[in-house]
Image: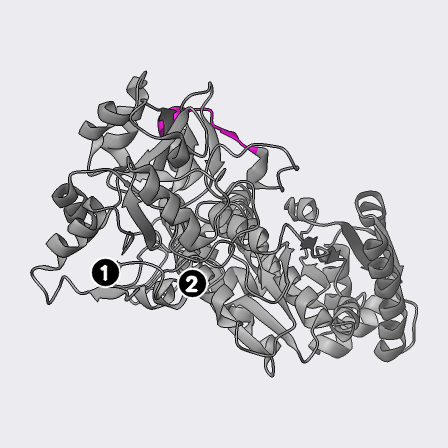
């Protein structure tokens, strides 16, 4: 069989020719916003059987009906709840499939033997035009050989289906990149059967409570029947075995870097690609861009076929927004072979001035750790964090200059002579700082992260930490160090020490104490290194 590739943008007869293939029982590759589908007349059992044959797809795996609008629902479904029309008005055309009771006109071969059928209206003008021209609902699973990654371009589809089907309509690359979200409206509350291009949060905004089927996060057991496409069988898999690494982006990157061999392939977020130089990699997009990840995930999985890669490690996004769908596709490609990367050990480090905190921080960095200096991060945020800048302006008026710089003298005049205003300033800082700390901690591949904060306890930042460490030292040693470090007098050094909290405060509020009685910074740094090594070893055993 010769597979014809249609180009409707340059051929004004392509839509009619493509629709004729469907009307006459043929198979047609169709573009949608999610992935390319392998379409046939959903009401023609023989045509539907050819879909299963071309894909090598198990016949108990249901197909989805593609229609041009909600006005077609009554033709193929019954007992349609009003909320189905609400969802259609809100999200159609778009990446949403609704499971509804089927009418007898829809063959059981199309529904995988089920009395329900999935229906959606794709958001692609060429395919909508083809369906209207054909005048029939189109059954269309993803247009790949069963089990392989779904196609997001006509070229992908041709790789799998050339010579097996009548035609492919080239509608350009898919804008979403993962299949439609499937919601079962035959149960109460509605159940998410497959995460996809419409985030769960969008459904919850309309439906309220939505349960998530266990097949979204784990493999169905033998004998369990799938109510929707993609629930039961291993899907999206390249030839090499895949291991999905969950956890924060930094932690998953660190795990992969530690377990790579020269024949490993890597699917990673853009920021971490330099860690894997020398290996074959495919970038998903930035760690914070779920749409880019959805658009690239199937292309990423296809990248490694034809290479000498013997295993693939894949970073996995969190489940927020489109991350649930991207993670689901990666995990199904891996046969749910998932490893959770050890989360980093978070240590808050504080203590009075002159005690030797700097030496402790150097020891943590010597261990491969990351130090987050809260004072430096606060000053970074003053330049770039709109939320913090707005809060300061609301509280203290125009404290930023015309070119956007903080007027430190003006703010200092307002707060340092007024204890209440100083408390107000600190409250604002410590309301915004944790968000930025959490972002940086999630991004860091370091096994141990130190939060350097003078007011670690008082600010509440200690709540972010697994352990809180106070570095203490005898008062006379501190005075001597301050004098040498800052070039100040004995009298002024004693005033600074006296103004700080005493050792009893830190012993009461911190989980760990490091006493610095060493004669030289290098000696104390060695002591601190041993301390952090023990902490990290205990953390990794948990």
First to last magenta residue range = 205-213
Q: 262 left or right of 31?
A: right
Label 2, on which residue?
296
Q: Residue at x 43, y 54 (%)?
A: 55
Residue 540 appearing in the image: yes
Where residue 473 sits: x, y (%)?
87, 63
Q: Secondary structure at mark 1?
A: loop
Q: Residue at x 44, y 45 (%)?
A: 321
Structural crowding at the residue carrying mark 2, measured as other residues with C-alpha within 10 Å and reported as few (<14), some (14–19) or many (≥20): many
Up the image or down, 398 lies above or below 101; here it is below
Q: Can you tell which quarter of the image residue 166 is in? A: bottom left
Label 1, on which residue?
171
Closest to the observer, 200 or 390: 200
Q: Secondary structure at mark 2?
A: helix
Closest to the observer, 99 or 212: 99
Closest to the observer, 277 or 335: 335
Q: Nearer the viewer, mark 1 or mark 2?
A: 1
């Amino acid at each position: 069989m010769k597979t014809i590739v249609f180009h409707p943008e340059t051929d004004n007869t392509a839509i009619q020719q493509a629709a004729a293939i469907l009307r006459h029982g043929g198979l047609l590759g169709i573009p949608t916003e999610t992935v390319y589908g392998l379409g046939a007349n959903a009401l023609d059992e023989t045509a539907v059987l050819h879909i299963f044959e071309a894909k090598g797809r198990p016949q108990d795996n249901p197909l989805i009906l593609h229609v041009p609008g909600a006005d077609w629902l009554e033709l193929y479904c019954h007992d349609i709840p009003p909320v189905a029309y609400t969802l259609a008005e809100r999200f159609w055309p778009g990446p949403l499939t609704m499971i509804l009771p089927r009418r007898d006109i829809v063959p059981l071969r199309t529904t995988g033997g089920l009395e329900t059928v999935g229906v959606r209206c794709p958001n692609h003008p060429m395919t909508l035009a083809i369906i209207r021209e054909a005048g029939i609902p189109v059954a269309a699973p993803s247009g790949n050989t069963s089990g392989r990654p779904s196609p997001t371009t006509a070229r992908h589809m041709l790789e799998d289906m050339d010579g097996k089907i009548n035609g492919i309509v080239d509608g350009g690359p898919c804008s979403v990149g993962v299949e439609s979200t499937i919601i079962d409206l035959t149960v109460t509350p509605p159940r998410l059967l497959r995460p996809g291009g419409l985030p769960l949060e969008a459904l919850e905004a309309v439906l309220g409570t939505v349960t998530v089927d266990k097949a979204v996060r784990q493999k169905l057991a033998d004998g369990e029947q799938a109510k929707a496409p993609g629930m039961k069988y291993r899907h999206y898999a390249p030839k090499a075995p895949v291991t999905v690494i969950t956890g924060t982006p930094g932690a998953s990157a660190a795990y992969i870097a530690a377990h790579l061999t020269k024949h490993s392939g890597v699917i990673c977020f853009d920021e971490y690609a330099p860690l894997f130089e020398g290996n074959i990699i495919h970038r998903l997009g930035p760690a914070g861009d779920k749409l880019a990840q959805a658009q690239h995930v199937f292309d990423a999985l296809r990248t490694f076929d034809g290479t000498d890669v013997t295993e693939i490690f894949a970073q996995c996004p969190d489940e927020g927004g489109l991350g649930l769908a991207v993670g689901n596709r990666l995990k199904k490609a891996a046969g749910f072979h998932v490893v959770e990367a050890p989360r980093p050990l978070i240590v808050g480090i504080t203590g009075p001035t002159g005690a030797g905190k700097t030496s402790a921080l150097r020891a943590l960095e010597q261990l491969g750790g990351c130090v987050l200096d809260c004072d430096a991060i606060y000053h970074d945020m003053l330049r770039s964090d709109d939320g913090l800048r707005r809060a300061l302006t609301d509280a203290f008026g125009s404290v930023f200059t015309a070119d956007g710089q903080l007027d430190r003298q003006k703010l200092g005049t307002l707060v340092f002579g007024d204890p209440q205003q100083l408390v107000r300033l600190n409250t604002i800082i410590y309301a915004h700082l944790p968000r930025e700390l959490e972002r940086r901690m999630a991004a860091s591949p370091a096994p141990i992260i130190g939060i350097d904060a003078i007011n670690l306890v008082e600010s509440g930042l200690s709540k972010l930490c697994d352990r809180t460490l106070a570095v203490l030292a005898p008062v006379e040693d501190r005075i001597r160090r301050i004098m040498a470090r800052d070039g100040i007098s004995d009298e002024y050094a004693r005033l600074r020490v006296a103004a700080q909290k005493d050792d009893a405060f830190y012993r009461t509020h911190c989980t760990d104490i490091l006493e610095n009685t060493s004669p030289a910074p290098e000696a104390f740094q060695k002591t601190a290194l041993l301390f952090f090594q023990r902490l990290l070893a205990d953390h990794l055993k948990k």
